[in-house]
Image: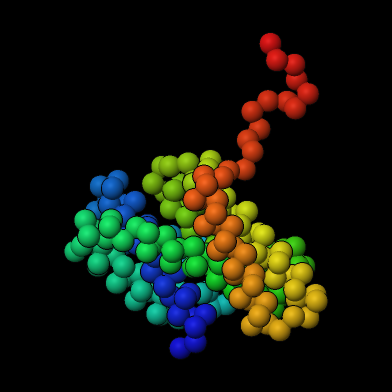
Amino acid sequence: MNLIYTIDILGTFAFAISGALVASDKKFDLFGVLIIAFVTAVGGGMLRDILINAHPINWIGDLNYLWTIFLAVFLTFLFKSKIAFLSKTLFLFDTIGISVFTLLGLQKGLSFDLHPLIALIMGMISAVFGGVLRDVLTNKVPLIFEKEIYASACLAGGLSYLVLNIAEAPKDINFIISASVIIIIRLVSVKYELELPKINDDLFSKKQ
């Protein structure tokens, strides 16, 4: 099992835990918790594969994703109060996870001969749309639409990957540098509570 695949599984685990915790707080039953955990963990990759017509779809081709989700829900069911104390660790897994999800999704898009811009969007979808689906299904405004630099970090890291790819940088070094870009932007933005600007009014409108 290589390092990137291991990080991919850890990211899936962190995403599944976050989905399970949200569903549990919404008082969903065990089946509902499982569905939300599943959607959060693999929804982005599944949507990407459907859009580019890639088969088998991510979790269908590798049962380890399902076992990881089942384990996350099982641990949440048994140790929910304890897991809350691991929020910083889970946040780290989540942050590393989105960096890997972004770049794996981007690479998959490029392997299907998509335009680099479309492949970049596919990478971003892989990383963030599981969380979007989770929030929509639990009747919340998706986190990426109202605060925190999240999807933007993925796009920045993906753009870095494309630039280094054009420069013919070694693939492993490219992956590490681009993943680091995503991780650093995400950590800095959360630490200093950075957000993208909001459109509150017409730029040239006069204040009343």
User: Looking at this view, is 82 or 40 the one in front?
Assistant: 82
User: Looking at this view, is 95 or 40 the one in front?
Assistant: 95
Residue found at the far bottom of this picture: 1
Residue 46 visible: no
Task: Give the answer, above or below, for where 200 lies relative to 103.
Answer: above
Residue 8 visible: yes
Q: Residue 159, position in %: x, y?
A: 71, 64
User: Looking at this view, is 58 or 73 the one in front?
Assistant: 73
Task: Give the answer, above or below, for where 190 lies relative to 199.
Answer: below
Residue found at the far right of this picture: 167
Indicate the quadrant where residue 124 lies: bottom right
The residue lying at 56 percent from left, 45 percent from top is 194
Task: Give the answer, above or below, for where 143 lies relative to 67.
Answer: above
The residue lying at 71 percent from left, 74 percent from top is 110
Q: Residue 140, position in %: x, y?
A: 43, 42
User: Looking at this view, is 5 or 35 the one in front?
Assistant: 5
Residue found at the far top of this picture: 208
The residue lying at 28 percent from left, 56 percent from top is 84
Indicate the quadrant where residue 197 lies: top right
Would residue 163 be found to the left or right of residue 14 on screen? right
Q: Residue 190, position in %: x, y?
A: 50, 50
Q: Can you say which quadrant of the picture contains the C terminus? A: top right
The residue lying at 63 percent from left, 53 percent from top is 152
Would residue 112 be found to the left or right of residue 103 on screen? right
Would residue 183 be found to the left or right of residue 89 on screen? right
Q: Residue 118, position in %: x, y?
A: 72, 63
